[in-house]
Each structure stands twice: as C-alpha cells, then as structure tokens.
Amino acid sequence: MPFFTGTAHRRVGKGNAVVKIYDDIFSWEGWGGMLRLASGRCRLRIFDLSQDPGRPGLTHLKPIIVLVTDVPESRMSVRSCAGHIATQVTQKFNIQPQRMVYVEHYPAVHYGTHDERFIPERYDGVEFVWMEGKAIRPAWRPLTPPLLDVVKKMAQEA
C-alpha cells in the first residue's frame, strides 16, 4: 500500500527535488452537527521527500512532511485542533500516519505599543497515538536540527 496517493504540484527549489504535494488553505470540519464546533482553517503544506530522483535508493522512514500554520481568519488554532487536523489530512490525502512527520509552524510575532516585544518563529513536531484511524493524545516538541533545517528550507522555498 503506498503511503501517499496524490498528485505532485511542483518541485521546491533549484536542484532540490522535494516534491510539494499541496500548498493551500485547508478547511477542517468540526463536530457537533449544525454547530460545527471546532471547525477552522489553516495553511497546509505537504512535502514528499521520497521522490528525489537525485538520490535513488535513499529511503526515509517518514518521507511525508505535513506543515500547518494558523491563518488569521480561522476561529480555531492548529494547536487546539491538532489531532482533528492530522486525522482529516491523513484521510483526505491518503497518507499513512506512521510515514508522516506532522509539524506546526508559528511565525515570528512583534507586538506591543511600538512593536517592541517579540516572539521568535517556532516549529513544533507533533506525535500522536493513532487509534482506529484517528490521531489522539498529541505531544509537542520543538524541532531540532537537522530536521528543523530541512523543514525551514522547505517552508521558505514554498
């Protein structure tokens, strides 16, 4: 069974054969019937590291990188709905969860009366327990090099 069945949109970067599978605003359905509790939107980018023709025979244990970022128009944050988003992304894009790295991106923020305060950019990897096809019990950890470097480069070039 393939770990991803989708169509590649384009390649990222000069000489870099990481394939971007998806880059758009992703809407997720909430629960609660007509109330649509916890529904929202985020920027979703999906990359496939396994389709690098320049490195034949190189195998990645988790070749699919799912990168989510909050968007201002969403009522819910990616952090508060991480399991729900991960579940829907794996279902919609037919991604095997054990072959995916799920990353939340938080851009740098300046705030204060004169933008004198600063929260630096952050990338957090999220691990889930998967039960019956659903992501539960998210555990966040800051990404560290070399994975952090790879994800930052993909995000900047996307």
Image (cartoon, grey):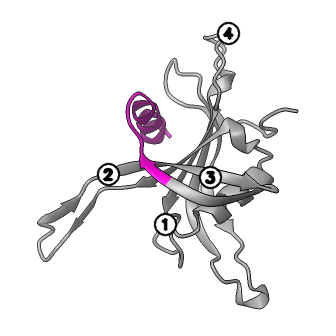
Q: Nearer the viewer, residue 117 or 124?
A: 124
In the displayed orientation, state which residue is furthest to the right. Answer: 1
Please tell me whether mark 3 or mark 2 is closer to you in this view.
3
**How far apart are the two marked residues, 2 and 1, measured between alpha carbons?**
15 Å
Lower sequence index among marks 3 and 1: 1
**Residues drawn in magenta:** 140-158
Q: Position of residue 131 (x, y in %)?
A: 76, 56
Residue at which label 4 appears: 56
Q: Amino acid at mark 3?
A: Phe
Residue at which label 2 appears: 121
Quadrant, the N terminus: top right
Lower sequence index among marks 3 and 2: 2
Please tell me whether mark 3 or mark 1 is closer to you in this view.
3
In the displayed orientation, state which residue is furthest to the bottom. Answer: 35
Lower sequence index among marks 4 and 1: 4
- Please tell me which residue is depicted at 61% across the width and 11% down the height of the picture: 54
Q: Quadrant of residue 55?
A: top right
- Please tell me which residue is depicted at 67% across the width and 65% down the height of the picture: 84
Residue at which label 3 appears: 128
In this rendering, the answer to whether 148 lies above or below 79 is: above
Residue at which label 1 appears: 71
**How far apart are the two marked residues, 4 and 1, measured between alpha carbons?**
37 Å
- Please tell me which residue is depicted at 54% across the width and 31% down the height of the picture: 12
Lower sequence index among marks 2 and 4: 4
